[in-house]
Image: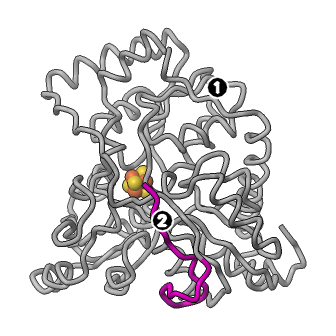
Amino acid sequence: MKKRIYPVTGNREPNAGDRAMYIPDLTNLSLPEIPQPLSSREIEEYTDRIAARLKEKDAVVIAHYYTGNEIQQLAEKTGGFIGDSLEMAKWGRNNPARTIIVAGVRFMGETAKILSPEKTILMPELKAECSLDLGCPADEFGKFCDEHPDHCVVVYANTSAAVKARADYVVTSSIALEMIEYLKLCDKKIIWAPDRHLGSYICNQTGAEMLRWQAHCIVHDDFKAAALKALMAEHPDARVLVHPESPADVTALADFAGSTSQILNKVKEMDAKEFIIATDIGIFYKISQACPDKVLIPAPNGGAGATCQSCAHCPWMRQNTLPLIEKLLDNPEGHEIHVDEDIRRKALISLNRLLDFSARLKEAGSVQALYESGVRI
Ligand code: SF4
C-alpha cells in the first residue's frame, strides 16, 4: 500500500501547496513475531556452544545497542563489539576475523559489507528491517533527488546501501547537526532523508534550508509528550534524555537530546541519580553496566495512535536470537549479506565523506573553525 505524503521545507508541517511524493504507508507494517524468551540456563548453554563455534570459524559478533541483553553479553564474552551502526561497521573492518556476524537490522549488515567487501558478513535474520529504511525506497527517493538537482543529498545511516549510494553524505545521529551546520555555512540547499523528526529537529536547531523526507522510526515515534510530562511530575529530580527520532513535543521536554551513544555518555557525566530515557530500552543494558547506581526509567510510549507493538524495543532488533546465531554458524546459507559492487562503491564515497568530516571536525574543534579553515568536504 502507498501513502501520499509531502516533503517539508523549512520549519513547518506539510500543506496542500507542497509537491507530493509517495512512500510506503508505515501504519500497516506487519511486524515480526516476538521470539520466546530463553531461560538463564539456555542462554548460558547457547553462549558456550556459540563461543566455541566462533573460534572454529574465525568469526566475531558485532551487536547493536538495541539488541537483547543476551546478544550483547554474547558479543562481550566472545571478544566482539557493541555500538551504533557505524561504530559496528568500523570495528568489524578493523578486526582481523574473516567472518563478521552482525546482530542488528539489515542496513547495518549492508553498512558492514560496504566497509569490508572482502569479508563474509552474516546476519541471524536477513528480514530484520527498519521502518526508516522501509520508508525510503531507493527508486522513489532517487526520483525525488533527480527533481532537485541543485540540492545536496544527506541521508541518515538508517538507509539501504542503494539510498546511501544516491547520497552525497551519510550521517549518524551523533554528527547530523554538525554536518548540516557545515553545509549551511557552505550555502548548500539540502535534501534530508529519511527520519522526519530528526530532520525537523536539525532544521530547528540550524535554520538550514532542507527538503525533508517523511519516514519515521516506529519505536521512537510512539513516545508521548503528555505521558512523559506526567512521569516527570512523579520524578521531579530525574533528568530527561531523548533521542531526536522522537516527536518534537517529546524532544522539547528533554534536558538533553542526542544519539544513543551520546545518551549513554550523558548518564555517565550527569550528577543526577534518576534518568527518564526516551530511546530503545536495549541501551539500558550498557547504561546499567556503566552506571549501576543510577536509576533508569523508560519514557512512556504506546497509547492512543501508537503503531509500534514493541514497548520501546524494536521488533526487528528482537529477531536477533542465540538459536539463530548458532544455526547460521552451522549453515550460513540464507544468512549472508550481498551488496551490488557498483552500489557499494558509490555508498562508500558518501560514507567516507562522513568519516572524513568527523576526523576534520575533531581536528578543527568546531564547525565554524572547520569552515573558516577553507577545508571543503
Ligand atoms: S529502533 Fe527504529 S530506527 Fe532503530 S532499527 Fe528499529 S525501526 Fe529502525
Earlier-in-chain disc, 2 versus 1: 1
How busy is the neighbourhood of tag 2: few (under 14 within 10 Å), some, or many (20 plus)? many
283 or 35, nearer to the observer: 35
Query: Does 93 lie within the magenta span?
Result: no
Q: In what quadrant does ligand 1 lie? A: bottom left
Q: Residue drawn 51% across and 80% down? A: 200
* Figure check: 347 above or below 195: above
**Residue 96: which disc?**
1
Residue beneath label 2, please?
215
At x 58%, y 53%, the residue is 137
Q: Secondary structure at mark 2?
A: loop
Is residue 116 toward the left or the right of residue 73 in the image?
Answer: right
The type of residue carrying mark 1 is: Pro
Horizontal and vertical percent for residue 340?
72, 33
Magenta stretch bounds: 1-19
> Foreground residue, 327 or 75?
327
